[in-house]
Image (tube, rainbow, N blue to C red):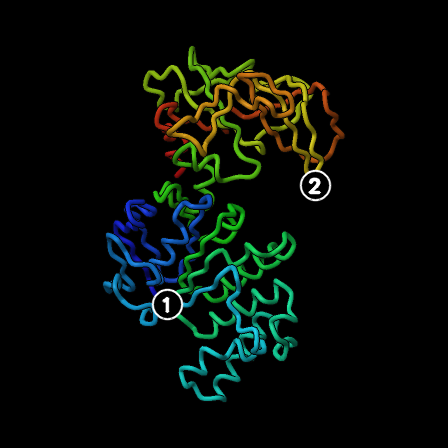
Amino acid sequence: MASIELKNLSKSFNTELVVDKISISVADGEFLVLVGPSGCGKSTLLRMIAGLEKVTEGDIFFNGEHSTDRPPRDRDIAMVFQNYALYPHMTVGQNLGFALKVRNIPKEEIANRVKKIATTLKLETLLDRKPRELSGGQRQRVAMGRAMIREPAVYLMDEPLSNLDTKLRVAMRTALLRLRDQLRVTTVYVTHDQLEALTLGDRVAVMRDGVLQQIDTPHTIFHRPSNVFVAGFIGSPSINLVEAKVADGFASFGQFKIPIGTEWNLQGRTSVILGLRPSDFERVESENENLVVFSVEVEVVEDLGTEINLLFSVKSPRVESDKFGSSAVSGEGDVGLLGVDAGECLFTVVLDSGTPIKSKQTMKLAIDPNRIYLFDSQTGLAIENSSTEAQA
């Protein structure tokens, strides 16, 4: 296995900077996930680690050895791609063993390693089939096996599940979790799917426009996002973000207000960006002294079977996390979406599917004021909270 260190790594195509001074250390045996929207530079960063893209600036180290200009074949890595990259004229067994064959590994050892990998990935009954005779999930397992059979020091995976349908993706994600815990090989995994990032990664690195936004454990990324973008990108449904006025110990937005404790380092701010996770709401029948209770009219009901998503209107414009830094606060809110008026937005709430709820129904929703998120309205950076800092 191997450790990886990236120091101030940058990549430019002509005059366009696509990776900007990324510094990351990946521990021996760690599973690091690079996540971000399309075009954020995550795949380019992975290809630089692999040696497939020339580094514009910065350095790459494997096990402390300078490897920036080392050829890919000398980095002891194996890559898994989203398009499987299987040889169509070879059987599954031949595909699995090909990398060993070209290295002149003895036939008996190749056969033993193919059998071992096939057993691990449940491919034993498929060894004589051609790729065209396999399902998408089976092809992806063969692609994984081709990487695993080499027993490399590092796995590099570029959106390996993105071509699969939802059911197969969930099944393969579970298989990857088991392999991760079984093998404990240093892995850098690229995805745009935040659910994959949260479930697979020992740590998650969130990227945007070539810049590293935050790197931490999945729990910390979700519960203590460093800025508005990370808060909005991680979590499904997305966090509700709105601009709020701060006065007399309250954050007011539209027709609602929430008390703000003294643990928040507001430093005289008169406005903040307030974030409320959809899953942090609960339904109540009456007032509760420990919770903030909202009376809302339900605009939309999405019954998903195991849970219900509710949407209600807030008389304040939405903060668009993915546009923050340019025009984050959209003065038109969700105008044109379900008839929402100018300057308003829709909040999403996730509830258990216990009690039937209908559109246009009035109900009470509550949230713990300790579960709110506050961000600077100018920079989008998270505002310090002494209670959460103490828990870290």
| Number of numbered discs | 2
Dividing the picture into quarters, in which one does residue 120 lie? bottom right
Q: Which residue is mark 1?
A: 1
Callout 2 amino acid: Thr
Q: x, y (%) of residue 51?
A: 33, 63
Q: Residue at x 64, y 65 (%)?
A: 135
> Residue 261: which disc?
none
Q: Residue at x 31, y 45 (%)?
A: 17
| Image position of 250 (left or right of 303) | left
Q: Nearer the viewer, residue 43 or 292?
A: 43
Dividing the picture into quarters, in which one does residue 366 lie? top right
Dividing the picture into quarters, in which one does residue 102 lie? bottom left
Q: Which residue is mark 2?
A: 306
Q: Reply above or below: 334 against 137.
A: above
Q: Residues within 10 Å of mark 1 (few under 14, many from 20)?
A: some
Q: x, y (%) of residue 180?
A: 49, 61
Quarter occupied by the N terminus: bottom left
Q: Residue at x 45, y 77 (%)?
A: 99
Q: Is residue 233 visible?
A: yes
Q: CA distance from mark 1 to mark 2?
A: 41 Å
Q: Reply above or below: 252 against 198.
A: above
Q: x, y (%) of residue 276?
A: 52, 28
Farthest residue to the top: give it: 248
| Image position of 232 (left or right of 216) | right
Q: Residue at x 44, y 41 (%)?
A: 221
Q: Nearer the viewer, residue 199 or 84?
A: 84
Q: Residues within 10 Å of mark 2 (few under 14, many from 20)?
A: few
Q: x, y (%) of residue 175?
A: 57, 61
Q: Earlier in the sequence, mark 1 or mark 2?
A: 1
Callout 1 amino acid: Met
